[in-house]
Amino acid sequence: MKKIFRKPLLFTAITMLSATVSSCLEEAFPEDGSLTQDQVEQADKAALAGAMTSYFTAGGDNPWDIGYMMFMMWRDAMTTDFPINDNTWDYFNYYPSQLSMGNTYNSGLWWDRGYSHISRANTTIKISSPDPDSEDAYYRGYAYALRAMLYFDMARTFEYKHTDIEALDRSADQRGIWGLTVPIITEETTEADSRHNPRAPFYQMYRFINSDLLQAQTYLKNFHSVASKDTPSLGVAYGLAARFWLELGSRFSRYPEDLAAQVEHETDEALSNYPALGITTATECFRNAADYARKAINEGYTPTTRTQWYDKSSGFNTPIDSWMWAIIISPENWMAKSCTWKSWVSYHCPEATYGMSDATEYAAYRLIDARLYSEMDENDWRRDTWIDPEFAAMDDSDEKKAEFTSRYSQVTTYNYEDFIKFNAYCGFKFRPAGGNGTTPSVGNAVSVPLMRVEEMYLIEAEALAYCEGAASAKAALEAFMNSYRMTEGTTFSTKASALEDVVNEIWIQKRIELWGEGLLWFDYKRRELAVEKGYIGTNHPALYRYNTYPEAVAPWMNIYIVDRVRDLNQMVILNPDPTGAIKTLWTE
């Protein structure tokens, strides 16, 4: 297997059509968004909905390009929580090693794919009936939910947040980019407009996203469950709103001046197309987050059970009652039909012997951060998802074999001899389809969670801390843990009582629960938490042991907007290039 080097940066102004979309669909839905009345009347909405769904798995030639899942991998790799065992074959090394994060092909993908996906949602909105009781309601609701998710992703990805690195933050000052997100392109935006379209300030973007979330709820009001889960239901719209309001609550509590700006612009005539947020305090945002999280929970989802989590055949590869939204890789998808090591399974599943996560040939399997593992309660049944360092350190003996039988044989298809080839902290959360780790055409056809109800319980707990107090949040956390994550006959109880201590306990559980699902990055940036990969006892590769500053955003989390975007749209001001911003590697 050979490493593939970067390609030149090539992308269009607004969209880059996926190879998964048929040529007839491309003819029916032009890239520039212009549609004749005949095209609107003849449009196949089901086909376009399928294109919105399939774009999650639309990839490219490079080994790391597995569609939207590539961004999930990159995001996790930027955090503290997702070390790699051996970085020799780490195709997601750009950000952990601070290499080539400026005007490169990879940086352009974040912008490219986001707007390409948004264009499909825009076209669906444009061609569907605005009547919420029409047969178009589901397509329109799907498009609004997807567009809200994508713009929320994009806004958080590209908005520059302070890093405490003088050169970068000074450059942000000079460029005047504080508070700027990304340009808003809707179904009404012409190509000419898109070329003179500035980055929207946060207070405009929040109004726009909230408007889409409200529209999604309106059009999905009768769709309480979706059998396949690769398209959103009303519960997903509520879940997206819970994420959104938690983001706003954190921002406005940390930066009262941003809250003042948001309130000041509530009556702007230029923003009158979007409903006002209707809040004046950060507490109200947290209240909304808690309420929406509870609404999502009440849509009938139930947290993953121990049996489901441990299932050697279907664990974290098949939608279940806890999954709210998912990417589904069918047996006909290119990752199953024609790939082996280039797939989600290859990068996530140690039991895929053909993948990058095997124990011997590449050994690029993923670990849980050593300090995070140490925070897990001894009676938390999730603990056996990862190899205990004490178990890994044991000499080969009957005692070690007995511990394997009692603990790890229930979570892996490997026998003892193969299992002990993996190092401490290796994660066995994700599994090949059907537990088949030898046949890529079978094992690669998995589903990947985009949203699970467990996240809603933890959003609710954090939001309650700031709108009802520490005691309420603590009770919510302990109720979740004792109902769903502790072994029978044991009890979880946190000694934390101060508000921020309780929130930190919730954060620890969120990091454990959502490990490997591509979501924790947003919380790191939202809460301005340091990334710490260098410390005594670290299990991060030596070349990745960079520590960022406390109460500041890791510089690599401010994604660069490539020069080509500015060439096509002169109104876009670029972010500073974060490549190599942290100068010193931690060493023992």
Image (cartoon, grey):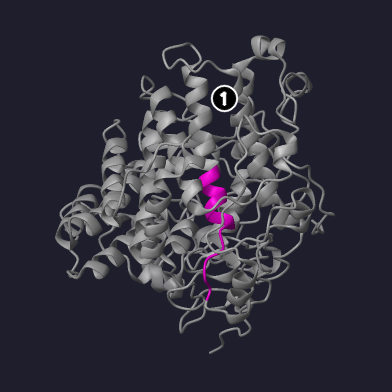
Residue at (73%, 57%) from the top-left corner?
562
| Quarter of the image where one finds residue 223 | top left
Q: Is residue 161 magenta?
A: yes
Looking at the image, which is closer to me, 525 or 385? 525
Q: Is residue 294 magenta?
A: no
Q: Is residue 273 above or below residue 417?
A: above
What residue does disc 1 label?
Answer: 125
Whole-percent x, y for residue 588 in the image:
53, 90
What amino acid is labelled 1 in the image?
Ile
Badge 1: residue crowd in 10 Å (few <14, some 14–19, many ≥20): many
Q: Please indicate whether residue 381 sits to the left or right of residue 88 in the image.
A: left
The kind of secondary structure the magenta stretch mainly shows is: helix
Q: Please indicate whether residue 73 sits to the left or right of residue 134 in the image.
A: right
Looking at the image, which is closer to me, 262 or 387? 262
The magenta span reads: 151-163
Residue at (18%, 51%) from the top-left corner?
479
